Image (cartoon, grey):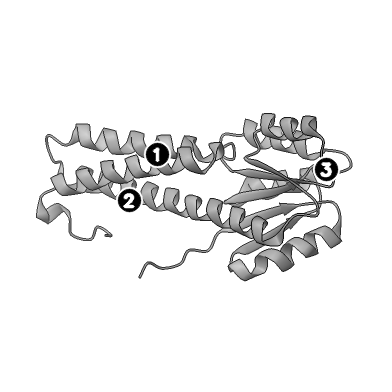
Amino acid sequence: MAERRTANILMVDDRPENLLALEAILQGLGHELIRASSGEEALKVLLTTDVAVILLDVQMPGMDGFETAAHVKRREKTRDIPILFLTAIDGEAHQAFRGYAAGGVDYLAKPFDPWLLKAKVSVFVELYNKRSELAAEADALRAQLARYDLAGLDGLCKEASEAVEKAQALLGQGEPALTEALESAATATHALRAALPSSAKVGLRR
């Protein structure tokens, strides 16, 4: 059975009671929940912490959720992190449009269904973990190729690397697109492993 991976989930809201409510909903998932009470604080967290998904309140004093998302998407390190916007504004289509235009993968109005929120967060954490595993596998394969100086596998190695990079680039576009890219990446890395001689496969994680 595969080892369960723990991910970081960043929750951004200027109201402590809202952060407490999010923690109560998500704590059962078993992941690390990180609080930020402003957009500025969230951006500081992202400088040093790898995050699987961001739950971002829209209405905050100073830097609001849309502006915060714009900064997240401009940074190369964080631009692929999925953002779920949370807002107390209900029924305003133009606000939802602004959320998607700012790079959000979803837009939920408060009060939202706790089970729905948990399900959405779980999906993006799982996709994040799959992407991380494939990236690690691709790195291991590249290291093996360099160690054994194997000829004739450059094309497969390039294909595997490009497939993983595509999956990473699609992370912010939602589950269907990323799932397809992840499957392509897995196929490419498995093909590369199959092409390795048995002596080069020693130590590779299955």
**Neighbours of disc 1 within 10 Å: few (<14), some (14-19), many (20+):** many
Residue 143: give x, y in percent of width and height.
Answer: 27, 47
Indicate which label's residue lies in the foreground, 3 or 1.
3
Label 3: which residue? Answer: 90
Residue 191: give x, y in percent of width and height.
Answer: 20, 44
Label 2: which residue? Answer: 137
Specify the farthest residue to the right: 61
Q: Mark 2 or mark 1, which is nearer the start of the sequence?
A: 2
**Neighbours of disc 3 within 10 Å: few (<14), some (14-19), many (20+):** few
Report the residue at 66% width, 68% height from top: 27
Residue 7 relative to residue 88: left or right: left
Q: What SS does tag 3 mark?
A: loop
Residue 116 relative to residue 190: left or right: right
Q: Is residue 124 above or below residue 157?
A: below
Q: Amino acid at mark 3?
A: Asp
Report the residue at 66% width, 48% height from top: 54
Q: Amino acid at mark 2?
A: Glu
Q: Is residue 14 above or below residue 95?
A: below
Give the CA separation, mark 1 to mark 2: 15 Å
Q: What SS does tag 1 mark?
A: helix
Report the residue at 78% width, 29% height from top: 94
Mark 1 touches mark 2? (CB < 8 Å): no
Q: Mark 1 or mark 3, which is nearer the start of the sequence?
A: 3
From this viewpoint, is residue 170 visible?
A: yes
Label 1: which residue? Answer: 181
Q: Is residue 202 above or below residue 81?
A: below
Report the residue at 48% width, 50% height from top: 127
Q: Nearer the viewer, residue 104 or 91?
A: 91
